[in-house]
Image (tube, rainbow, N blue to C red):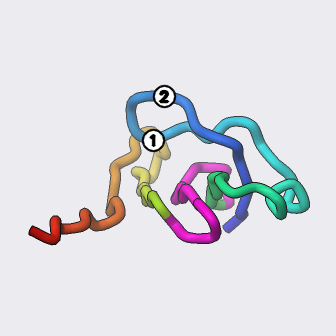
Amino acid sequence: MTERYFTTYSGIRLPLKPVGELQADEIENRNTFFVGYFDTHERLIELQKRVYGDIELRHRYSSTKTGCCYGLISPMPMVRPMW
């Protein structure tokens, strides 16, 4: 698994497409960035949005054996209202 860093993502359909790749030393002074995890075939398997070191958003994906189709496995749990 390979970990790579990005400024944002594009697209309105899943899987989200990370764009604006950053080097590891470029995220040291950033408050917000995305972390993409890729398999050995360079398919996105997880995308996280990090804000001040915390994971604010997480999408995990799986693919078929042919690699043609993605499905969302588990987004971050929704926070229940406190009222």
Query: Residue 15, labelled with which disc?
Result: 1
Q: Secondary structure at mark 1?
A: loop
Q: Residue 63 versus residue 20: which sits nearer the camera?
A: 20
Q: Position of residue 58 (x, y in %)?
A: 45, 60
Answer with the quarter of the image where residue 21 lies: top right
Q: Position of residue 73 (x, y in %)?
A: 33, 60
Identify the residue at horizontal 87%, vertical 54% (top origin).
26
From the viewer's perspective, is residue 32 above or below residue 82?
above
Q: Position of residue 70 (x, y in %)?
A: 40, 45
Quarter in which the N terminus is drawn: bottom right
Magenta range is: 40-55
Left or right of residue 72, residue 10 in this image:
right
Identify the residue at horizontal 41%, vertical 29% (top origin).
12
Q: Residue furthest front?
A: 83
Residue 49 appears anywhere in the view: yes
Residue 50 within the magenta-colored segment of the rendering: yes
The residue to which callout 2 is attached is: 11
- Single out the mark in the foreground, 1 or 2: 2
Left or right of residue 74, residue 65 in this image:
right
Identify the residue at horizontal 16%, vertical 65% (top origin).
81
Q: Are marks 1 and 2 in contact (CB under 8 Å)?
A: yes
Three-letter amino acid code at the position of disc 2:
Gly
